[in-house]
Image (spheres, grey):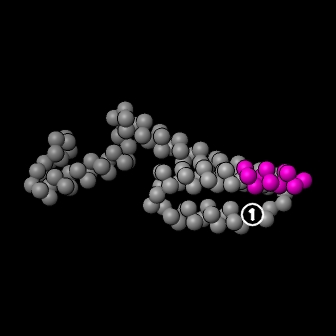
Amino acid sequence: ERLGLSLGSAMARQALRELLRALQRYTPENQDFRKHVLSEFRRNADLKDKQEIRRTIALAKDYTFLITNVNEHLDLLLDCNISTDRASRQRETVKKIARRVGLRTSYEDDVD
């Protein structure tokens, strides 16, 4: 019984570390979600039901998978020159900077 609990807690720590790494890598400015994740793990630290422990660990792994793959997909779209919201925001930023210094960009929609 003791080995099962320590194995569960080791798996939970690993899932938490992976989730926190993904959050730090892809959303470092979102500290509120990081705090929420930590508080949820602390709140569930006393769980005894093995099924509930497995479900919580699986949820953390699913969130990690989702965060990682959505961001990798966005990077792939940018690499293939397919516009995404991030690309549009970058384009608008470049336009604003160019206008501040009295220049225009070569973008088709940058007309005065």
The amino acid on which the numbered mark 1 sits, given as a three-letter code, is Ala
Residue drawn at the location 79% of the way across and 65% of the way down: 46
25 drawn magenta:
no
> Is the residue 85 above or below the residue 76 in the image?
below
Which residue ends up furthest to the right in the rendered image? 1
The boundaries of the magenta stretch are: 1-11
Residue drawn at the location 46% of the way across and 57% of the way down: 28
Residue drawn at the location 38% of the way across and 43% of the way down: 84
Residue drawn at the location 11% of the way across and 56% of the way down: 101
> Is the residue 67 above or below the residue 30 in the image?
above
Q: How many marks?
A: 1
x%, y% of residue 73?
Answer: 47, 39
Whether residue 5 is visible here, answered yes or no, is yes
Whether residue 59 is visible here, answered yes or no, is no
Left or right: where 61 falls relative to 109: right
Nearer to me, 88 or 26? 26
x%, y% of residue 58?
Answer: 70, 48
The residue pinned by badge 1 equals 45
Nearer to me, 33 or 96? 33
Q: Which SS class for mark 1? A: loop
x%, y% of residue 31?
Answer: 50, 64
Which residue ends up furthest to the left in the rendered image? 102
Give the dominant element type of the magenta stretch: helix, strand or loop.
Answer: helix
Left or right: where 28 falls relative to 88: right
7 drawn magenta:
yes
